[in-house]
Structure formats: structure tokens, C-alpha cells
């Protein structure tokens, strides 16, 4: 009688185990994704030690902006033949490049990082920039109306400026400008626009962005004067 009771219990345990295993350990549908595509931060690039993201300083005139990857659209308009509205995934379809670059803030700090993303030139080519266009104005979530900053088209073209979707191989964090940061090579940090939603091609060479209106040099070469030289 006692023996029978034990086997009933073992039978129940086995049955429960079978049900548990068949049901896929309580999970339904797709098998669990293997973490092979988990991002690993690069510590070195082209023989140079990179500043870890946690040690990179951060600047934002009105706090971190959070953009939604699924609804994000980059508008490219103004003096173009073919205005664009590109999703995050469409932007990532452009061929990507990686650069080793220093970001130098006028506040006196700087860091070295690996920046990866498409060349702005490829996107501008698709937009068909008109010959009268001289500058690209970057509209951002924090300065949506007037535009945050601008770069000369010649500078963008000659330097193959990148839009960095990755920083040290990690998807750009929100506080660093997700979905991308403009890698304004050899320009002060204030030209490295974050949270960009619109790029307008314009012929207005007198345009000034947020910091530039406040007196920062519109040229912004990071080995030059941070402030606009006031003549007289
Ligand atoms: N939209 C936007 N982009 C911005 C800023 C900002 O306030 N708003 N700050 C700039 C400044 S002053 C610097 S130094 C760099 C800093 O980049 P990081 O925060 O990714 O280090 O971002 C630049 N891009
Ligand atoms: Mo800065």
C-alpha cells in the first residue's frame, strides 16, 4: 500500500516534468535569441586606446532627449530635388564607416572615440542637392524651430562627414544623441549635433545656430578661436 503511494507521486512528478518540457519551459513561440549580437564596447581602434563611454563627458543645453527608434524620421529638405523622409532602418542601409576622432568641447574637455555610421554625402546625393545650396542646417529636438547648428556643404563634402549611429561599437545612447550624432571632424563639440530630426539645405551663408548666435565661432575649427572675432 505504501509502495503504491510513492509510485503515484513519482508518476505525477514525471507527468509534470513532461508537460513542463513540452511547453518549452513555460515560454511560447520563438526560441530565445542567442546573445551573439549583444554589443561589446570597443576599447581600442587603429592602435589607439579609446575613452570608455562612462568616462566621456556629455553636454546638452536642455537635458537628454529621447527619440523613438520605431517612429523616428530624418527629413532632408530645402534646396534639394528629392526631399527625403528616412526611417532609422533606412538610414542604417547606407554603407557605414568608422572613424577614430576626438571630440573637443569649448569647456576644455575632450575624449577619443570610435564613431561609426553612414556618410552624410550618400544621403545628400539621394536628396539631389541643388547647386545654390551652400550650407546644411541641423534641426534638433532641443532646437526645432530655428535649427541647432549648421555646417558648410564644402566642408561636409570634402571631409565625408559621418552620422555616428555607434560610439565605440555601442548603439548611440540617448544622452549622446540617439539616433545619431554628427561627427563634425576637427570642429568644436558644439557643431556635433545630437537628436537631429531634419537637415535643411540652404543658401543662407549668414545663418547662425544656437551657440553661434550666442557668440561662438561659426567656423568652429577646434584649433582656432572658440569665439567669433569681434572686429573694431
Ligand atoms: N542637439 C544638441 N546637440 C549638441 C548639444 C546640445 O546641447 N544639443 N551640445 C553640443 C556640445 S556643446 C558638445 S561638447 C557635444 C557633446 O557631445 P556628447 O554629449 O555626446 O559628449 O554635443 C553637442 N551637440
Ligand atoms: Mo561643447
Image (cartoon, rainbow, N blue to C red):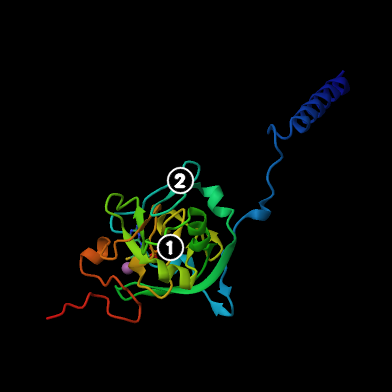
Whether label 1 lies within 8 Å of ligand 1 gets the answer yes
The correct choice, above or below, for 204 with respect to 93 in the image is: below
Quarter of the image where one finds residue 44: bottom right
Q: Bin the neighbour count of mark 1 within 10 Å (Cα to Cα): few under 14, some 14-19, many 20 and up.
A: many
Task: Give whichever of 199, 165 is nearer the camera.
Answer: 199
Instruction: Tally the marks.
Output: 2
For residue 182, the mark is 1
Quadrant of the rendered image containing residue 5:
top right
Q: Can residue 111 be seen at all in this image of the molecule?
A: yes
> Is 156 or 129 nearer to us in this picture?
129
In this picture, residue 141 sits left or right of residue 23: left
Residue found 44% across the figure and 68% down from its top: 156
Q: Is residue 5 left or right of residue 198?
A: right
Ligand 2 in which quarter: bottom left
x and y percent of residue 8 in the render?
83, 21
Name the residue at 29% across, 53% down: 143
Residue 196: x, y in percent?
40, 54
Q: Which residue position holds label 2?
A: 73
Specify the quadrant that holds the N terminus: top right
- Give me the residue at 26% from left, 60% from top: 210
The image shows residue 26 at horizontal and vertical percentages of 69, 32
Q: Give the quadrant of the C terminus.
A: bottom left
Q: Depth check: give the residue in front, 204 or 85.
A: 204
Q: Disc 1 or 2, which lies upstream in sequence?
A: 2
Q: Quadrant of residue 188?
A: bottom left
Amino acid at each position: 500500500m505504501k509502495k503504491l503511494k510513492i509510485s503515484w507521486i513519482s508518476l505525477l512528478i514525471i507527468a509534470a516534468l513532461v508537460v513542463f518540457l513540452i511547453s518549452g519551459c513555460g515560454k511560447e513561440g520563438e526560441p530565445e535569441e542567442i546573445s551573439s549580437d549583444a554589443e561589446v564596447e570597443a576599447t581600442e581602434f587603429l592602435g589607439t586606446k579609446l575613452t570608455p563611454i562612462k568616462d566621456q563627458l556629455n553636454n546638452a543645453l536642455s537635458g537628454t532627449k529621447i527619440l523613438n527608434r520605431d517612429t523616428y524620421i530624418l527629413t532632408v529638405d530645402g534646396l534639394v530635388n528629392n526631399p527625403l523622409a528616412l526611417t532609422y532602418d533606412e538610414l542604417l542601409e547606407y554603407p557605414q564607416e568608422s572613424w577614430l576622432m576626438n571630440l573637443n568641447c569649448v569647456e576644455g574637455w575632450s575624449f577619443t572615440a570610435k564613431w561609426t555610421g553612414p556618410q552624410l554625402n550618400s544621403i545628400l546625393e539621394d536628396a539631389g542637392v541643388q547647386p545654390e545650396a551652400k550650407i546644411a542646417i541641423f534641426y534638433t529636438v532641443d532646437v526645432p524651430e530655428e535649427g541647432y547648428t549648421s555646417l558648410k556643404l564644402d566642408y561636409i563634402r570634402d571631409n565625408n562627414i559621418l552620422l555616428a549611429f555607434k560610439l565605440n561599437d555601442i548603439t548611440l545612447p540617448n544622452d549622446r544623441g540617439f539616433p545619431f550624432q554628427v561627427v563634425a571632424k576637427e570642429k568644436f563639440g558644439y557643431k556635433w549635433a545630437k537628436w537631429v530630426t531634419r537637415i535643411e539645405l540652404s543658401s543662407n551663408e549668414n545663418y547662425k545656430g544656437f551657440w553661434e548666435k550666442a557668440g561662438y565661432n561659426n567656423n568652429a575649427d577646434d584649433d582656432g578661436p572658440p569665439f567669433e572675432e569681434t572686429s573694431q
